[in-house]
Image (cartoon, rainbow, N blue to C red):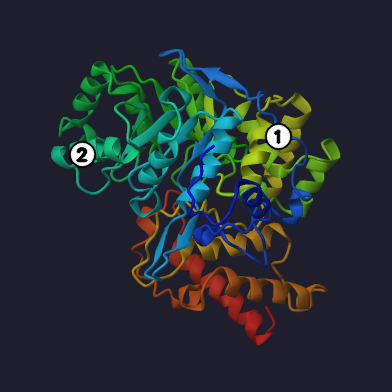
Amino acid sequence: MKQKSKAAINRRDFFKVAAAGTVTAGTLVYQGCKPRSSASSEGGGAVGEVPTNGMTYRTNPHTGDVVSLLGYGCMRWPLRKKADGSGEEVDQEIVNMLVDYAIEHGVNYFDTAPVYIRGWSETATGIALKRHPRNKFFIATKMSNSSDFSRQTAINMYNNSFKALQVDYIDYYLLHSVGGGNGVETFLQRYIENGVLDFLIAERKAGRIRNLGWSFHGDVKVFDYVLAMDIQWDFCQIQLNYQDWHNATGRNVNAEYLYEELVKRNVPAVIMEPLLGGRLARVPVQAFSMMKEVHPQDTPAQWAFRYAGTPENVLTVLSGMVYMEYLQEDIRTYAPLVPLNEQEYKTLEEVTKVLIDSDYIQCTECQYCMPCPYGIDIPGTFGHYNRCVSAGKILKSANDNSYKEARRTFLVGYDRSVPKLRQADHCIGCDICRPRCPQRINIPSEMRRINRYAENLKQKSVF
């Protein structure tokens, strides 16, 4: 495979570096309380050969597409500093290598959007995929017209996606994040009253869109309304994981209901948030112990991906695989998929009880709350706190036996993962972020809670 000469890292060296978890990925670079690649609840991660011909595939009943059960979520590509120091950019060489490796190992579904990674995702994804035959991949992107609902703005966004992705047809096109705002009223403004949905249906008829669907976050009345429309929906993207099956929070709806409604109408489900923003990959020690009793070698991420992939109406499960080790582990899980059995389902029900009773902030690190006008790294702050929760490093009292270690873990890890000027103590409570959060987290309140906790640690005060 041809590689750009300017890349200062060859393919073999890249795999070594990526497996060590050192690829820069914006707010995904953590130390202290660590992400899924090395969290203590994962037992060191999955090991073994990565199959090249074992991928599980599902068939879309509407178009006959044979889609890999593992889909590549392109919401967070690795970033690097620009050579002139003027800011960040997508690390295209590493994106190319990740995409090459995914395709070589059977992954053929790639999901992006105009708004991902500050507007860079479509272009980076298009560059990487353009180097492969068009029949080797399915590309999914979205109508992300969340602020300007004019017809021309929507059509311009649609046409720009073709240019950025360097394609002449889009395999899976979605109405993005249906269900927010003022419910059905907002849906009608975004897609119906301006004629945008009629335009997209005509584009599907012309062949420039092969599958037309929508992603859902929010008001279940909107979900029911859209699903009942006299339109052939080729697929629908929903949040599904073992915690959300019966215990969805915020703007989300229990996945059991969403999934069963799609089954009734023969609409294939594309799954997002199988790890619930990474939380299901770094579960508390108590929960992990339950898993190890059944499968000593499996990671929490493998449990979560098997859960998301087991239902037969699931077409593909999206994973944002920024690091090579994530990509390799997820390929192993679905090459081939071993569906969950009754005992495993019961184990995850018990794990869920632990999770919903824990101190987690229900943040999926989706970045929808960003940018903060005051520079706060909201998902980075929540992510660090949640990793410490999963590692059992959140103190309840200054008299805890592990006080010294946990204090250092939190404070040192906090400074390493979130710059001081972007930490919770700089939040002024403007509340601009709160309406944007799909999980309906009271962000200013949680920022104050984290800041109080950090200040107590700094002062070595009694909780």
Residue 183 image offset from top left, x and y in percent: 30, 40
Camera sees residue 382: yes
Question: Which residue is at 72% across, 53% downward?
Answer: 284
- Is residue 344 left or right of 144 when viewed as pictured? right
Nearer-the-camera pick, 216 or 329: 329
Q: Amino acid at mark 1?
A: Val
Residue 108, compared with residue 327, is above or below; it is above
Camera sees residue 217: no
Nearer-the-camera pick, 345 or 418: 418
Give the residue number, with chain letter if any, for mark 1.
50
Nearer-the-camera pick, 199 or 107: 107
- Is residue 197 left or right of 419 when viewed as pictured? left
Residue 85, compared with residue 59, is above or below; it is below
- What is the number of the mark on residue 165? none
Residue 168 image offset from top left, x and y in percent: 29, 27
- What is the number of the mark on residue 154? 2
Task: Tell me whether the residue at label 2 lies in contact with that at label 1, contact meaning CB atoms closer than 8 angstroms.
Answer: no
Q: Amino acid at mark 2?
A: Ala
Q: Which quarter of the image is occupied by the N terminus?
A: top right
Q: Where on the picture, by quarter, is residue 32?
A: bottom right
Q: Please, which residue is most extreme toward the front here? A: 5
Of labels 2 and 1, the one closer to you: 1
Question: Which residue is at 51% across, 74% downward?
Answer: 419
| 10 Å crowding of disc 2: few (<14), some (14-19), many (20+) | many
Residue 86 image offset from top left, x and y in percent: 37, 70
Q: Secondary structure at mark 2?
A: helix
Question: Which residue is at 40% across, 46% downward?
Answer: 124
